Image (cartoon, rainbow, N blue to C red):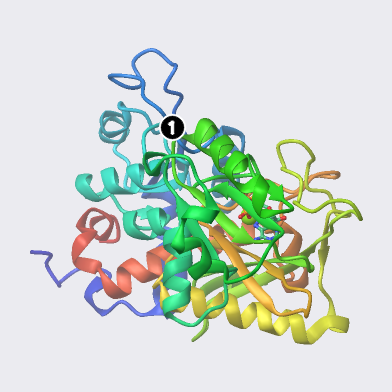
């Protein structure tokens, strides 16, 4: 039991106390920013297996997040890979809170492995819980949930390698999903990133081959969708607490920002992977007052998704419109790129900060403060090690 006769009566936590608590935590809280461990590194896993999601370490961004946390004032910030040594490392370094900047090491549903491990260890984290991580990183699972809550997403079906060669003419499911629609389609991995292995398929005849290509590359389910020919947008959304203009604010609605149009070139059907072409200001156009209607729709959509899925960390939602301008959700990225914005390269999320007079560090501070506020308000009993620091 935690005694109540303390210098700070933590049982009566109130949002107004957050700045005072953070002042104390700056000196005491030990934070680890965790990036994707490399399964080829000796001692990182017991057996190397397959990863259906294209692996990336995200270490550079993890270091940028760590630098921001240090600049904000946290005096004990570590950067650690999420391989099998993670629990030992967290214990050795006496870590109190983890920031997840990882897509996992290997295996199926890799994005949920590290939050699941942290749940088992009793370690709080900035990031999505295992179920939300998995749902968001499996586009078909996310789309099924979107349909159930009435949010538009392109008509689709899936095909798993164990179901054999895909022949649309032999599959009643195909007609159920698409009716007499003849194309074009998009075929892509259910768990992917950076537009890798995303195929534009003009006609039904090309589907079988594209599905086989996705199966070969990922050994995992392929998603077949109607192609949406319209404009492409994204919008970021995070929690209720933000740090703006040197002060914390808590709003009744999640903070939706960075309403950006992803600018496609005239012959560009699929937005080119950021692995091939960096995100520069001309590839992402921040939407202004001249497009207030679409902008507000994106903001409302983002808030609705955040609320319906009970998210408690940042996502970037990718949206595309049909020929009539109607918006359809493509996916929500559970670990959107948080690259520190430089002169020629930025991230789709960071592009939207200036509009709210926020810096990169303000966003990082908002995310960590929102998580601490959530834990102190809703779950104070599961973070006794952090409460102890506040005595
Ligand atoms: N149904 C669709 N209609 C039109 N274009 C699509 C469709 N699905 C995907 N795309 C195009 O392919 C790109 C990548 O698709 P999606 O966002 O689903 O996957 P991803 O590889 O996870 O993306 P990200 O780069 O955001 O991580 C989109 O940005 C879009 O340009
Ligand atoms: Mg996307």
Q: Quadrant of residue 237?
A: bottom right
Query: Residue 81: percent from the left, percent from the top?
Result: 43, 31
Foreground pick, 297 / 52: 52
Query: Residue 150: percent from the left, percent from the top?
Result: 49, 82
Residue lying at the far top in this picture: please name it. 42
86 displayed left or right of 155: left
Foreground pick, 29 / 208: 208
Residue 307 showing in the rendered view: yes
Foreground pick, 42 / 170: 170
The image shows residue 132, relative to residue 240, as above or below, that is: above
The image shows residue 200, relative to residue 227, as above or below, that is: above
The quarter of the image holding the C terminus is: bottom left
Foreground pick, 106 / 358: 106
Residue that appears at 79% across and 53% down: 269
Residue that appears at 32% across and 41% down: 95
299 displayed left or right of 191: right
Residue that appears at 45% across and 62% down: 173
Residue position marked by numbered label 1 in the rendering: 51
Quarter, ligand 1: bottom right
Query: Residue 388: percent from the left, percent from the top?
Result: 23, 57
Query: Residue 62: percent from the left, percent from the top?
Result: 55, 39
The quarter of the image holding the N terminus is: bottom left
Q: Quadrant of residue 217?
A: top right
Residue that appears at 84% across and 51% down: 268
């Amino acid at each position: 039991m935690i005694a109540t006769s303390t210098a700070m009566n933590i049982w009566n936590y109130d949002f107004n106390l957050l700045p005072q608590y953070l002042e104390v935590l700056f000196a005491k809280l030990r934070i680890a920013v965790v990036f994707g461990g490399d399964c080829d590194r000796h001692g990182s896993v017991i057996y190397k297996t397959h990863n259906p999601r294209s692996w990336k370490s995200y270490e550079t961004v993890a270091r940028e997040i760590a630098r921001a946390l240090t600049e904000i004032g946290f005096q004990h910030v570590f950067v650690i890979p999420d391989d099998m040594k993670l629990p030992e490392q967290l214990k050795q370094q006496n870590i109190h809170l983890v920031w997840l900047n990882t897509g996992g090491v290997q295996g199926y549903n890799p994005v949920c492995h590290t939050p699941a491990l942290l749940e088992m260890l009793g370690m709080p984290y900035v990031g999505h819980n295992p179920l939300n991580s998995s749902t968001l990183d499996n586009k078909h699972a996310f789309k099924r949930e979107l349909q159930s809550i009435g949010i538009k997403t392109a008509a689709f079906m899936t095909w798993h390698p164990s179901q054999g060669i895909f022949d649309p003419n032999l599959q009643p499911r195909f007609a159920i999903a698409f009716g007499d629609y003849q194309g074009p389609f998009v075929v892509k991995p259910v768990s992917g990133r950076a537009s890798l292995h995303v195929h534009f398929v003009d006609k039904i005849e090309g589907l079988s081959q594209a599905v086989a290509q996705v199966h070969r590359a990922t050994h995992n389910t392929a998603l077949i969708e109607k192609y949406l020919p319209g404009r492409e947008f994204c919008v970021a959304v995070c929690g209720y607490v933000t740090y703006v203009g040197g002060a914390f604010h808590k709003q009744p609605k999640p903070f939706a920002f960075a309403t950006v149009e992803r600018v496609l070139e005239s012959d560009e059907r699929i937005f080119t992977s950021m692995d091939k072409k960096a995100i520069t200001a001309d590839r992402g156009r921040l939407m202004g007052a001249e497009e207030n209607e679409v902008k507000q729709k994106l903001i409302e959509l983002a808030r609705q998704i955040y609320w319906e899925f009970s998210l408690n960390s940042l996502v970037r939602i990718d949206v595309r419109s049909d020929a009539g301008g109607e918006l359809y959700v493509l996916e929500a990225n559970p670990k959107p790129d948080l690259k520190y914005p430089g002169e020629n390269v930025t991230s789709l999320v960071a592009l939207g900060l200036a509009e709210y007079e926020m810096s990169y560090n303000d966003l990082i501070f908002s995310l960590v403060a929102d998580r601490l506020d959530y834990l102190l308000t809703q779950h104070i009993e599961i973070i006794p090690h952090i409460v102890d620091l506040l005595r």
